Image (cartoon, helix red, strand yellow):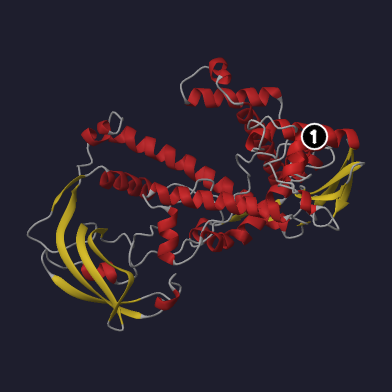
Amino acid sequence: MKYEVATAEKSTVKITMTFSHDEWVAANDKAYLANRKRYSVNGFRKGKAPKHVLELYYGKGLFYEDALNGLFSEHYGTVLQEKSKEFTAVGDPTLSVEDLSDEKVVLVAITPVKPDVKIGQYKGIKINKFEYTVTDADVDADIESTRERIAEKGEATGRPAQFKDIAKIDFVGKVDGKEFDGGSATGFDLTLGSHQFIPGFEEQVVGMNVGETKDIPVTFPEDYQAEDLKGKPAVFTVTLHKLTESKLAPLDDAFAKKLGSENMTAYRAKVKERLERNAASRSRNETENAIITEIAKTATAEIPDAMIEKQEDVSMQRMEYNLSYQGIRMEDYLAYIGTTRDEYKKNFEEEARRTVLNQLIVEKLIEVEKITASAKEIEEKVKEQAASVGKDAESYKKTMDPRQLEYIEGDIKVTKLFDFLMANNEMVLYKEEKAAAKKPAAKKTAEKTESAEEKPAAKKPAAKKPAAKAEGEEKPAAKKPAAKKTVKADDKKGE
């Protein structure tokens, strides 16, 4: 097999593979041996008819498609491997047959590849630096949240509904006097004050007594996901069946011991330490995002559609995971908001394009600044991970997948890159008061998506901004195509 590689448009390469007469004959014979049992011919046992008989009976091109696929599968990965220093495939190729004759066969693969990114200024820029601190009030709030989470639940009697109660309700919603899809439920458990429902709904349930039925007027938000309900007034007829309250434990040493600490002083110290770690991580993440966002303003890259689609799929998988965490199937959620998977995936296009560009910038800067991870640095990270799960480094390393080590190496490089960028730019402290009023640019951990079952107020989740670090991202394999593609003999040009 001979092949040529040429640069094509929009970050693709054209790989032309030419196979000789002998190679084509061998591929046909191989396809015949692999598929002959599928065909029957009178006078022969099934699978025993000679190749030329099957071709006479079913047509000369009977095995062409399998032969072409065989040639592609056998040689395409080799081409990618041999050219791995020149380009990296980032998606499945588009295949065609340029020539098919007794003398030769020519296959053409148009393959999307990782583009080069042109970066403008990345040093000497004024960039916001985020710093978040932990106050005693933050510690109190976290302890109170834990207290509520582990509180014993019991039925509340002899009083009306209060905020933080779990109200078991039936409701029927009407717009212009008519019921609408998704506006009714029976036996729904609503935590009052959780903001699950549209503004004004939960506040009007507060004060109701068990057994009471009440009409609650509300107005759907202008940004509500259902087009036919946006901004419209509605009335929900609500019946309260039961109230469940949380019986909070006293904040004493017994409470602390239940949570693994000797006393409340030790427990508060543990909570503060955890919150400070989270605050430091948040500060770092948002600062990194501010840096990469600023650099991206002058960066350009011709990103192939395959990379955008792949990142959109990642966002959809994250979304699906978040929903499943809440016990909601993706199909049910899409049906509830009246859209399809493909249509909903378009919501992530801008985020995906931004994420891919950021990843390309990071990779390019690591290359330009010659940032590396030493064996010692990798070993130290392995020790940290081993210690976190109570194992020694050697035994832990034996259980690690090679990709874990690649990830550790990549994470060290990315961390060192941002240390370098912080040291070489003018980092201006962004006051916490301002930052608190602004939604964080990104978080490394997936956030919970609002429940589709939170009727009538479930809101369509907004796409989240990507983190600066492309954590866990695997580079495309150069040794084999991402997925087997079918080459059809009728793809031949001019036929």
Q: From the viewer's perspective, is residue 138 above or below residue 188?
A: above
215 in relation to 335, above or below: below
The answer to whether residue 96 is seen in the rendering is yes
Residue reaching furthest front?
A: 43
Q: Identify the residue shown where x is 44% and y is 54%.
A: 330
Q: As drawn, is 373 to the left or to the right of 86?
A: left
- Toward the left, the furthest residue is 158
Judged left or right of residue 67, residue 127 is left
Q: Residue furthest right?
A: 103
Q: In which quarter of the image is residue 363?
A: top right
- Residue 29 on image: x %, y %: 78, 32
**In the depicted structure, whether residue 245 falls above or below residue 280:** below
Q: Which one is nearer the viewer's eye here, 63 or 224?
A: 63
Q: Which residue is disc 1 drawn over?
A: 27
Q: Disc 1 residue type?
A: Ala
Q: In this view, does 42 lie to the left or right of 215?
A: right
The 10 Å Cα crowd at callout 1, few under 14, some 14 to 19, many 20 or more, is many
User: Residue at the spot x=22%, y=44% of the render?
Assistant: 151
From the viewer's perspective, is residue 354 above or below residue 32?
below
The secondary element bearing badge 1 is classed as helix
User: Measured from the top left, where is residue 421 in percent x and y?
Assistant: 71, 46
Horizontal and vertical percent for residue 221?
A: 40, 74
Q: Which of 459 and 308 is in front in this view?
A: 308
Q: In which quarter of the image is residue 30?
A: top right
User: How many numbered discs?
Assistant: 1
Q: Position of residue 288 (x, y in %)?
A: 63, 48
Is the N terminus in the top left, top right, bottom left or bottom right quadrant? top right
Looking at the rendered image, the quarter that the C terminus falls into is bottom right
Q: Does the rendering let one see residue 449?
A: no
> As rendered, which of 403 and 379 lies closer to the eye?
403
Tell me: 391 left or right of 379. Answer: left
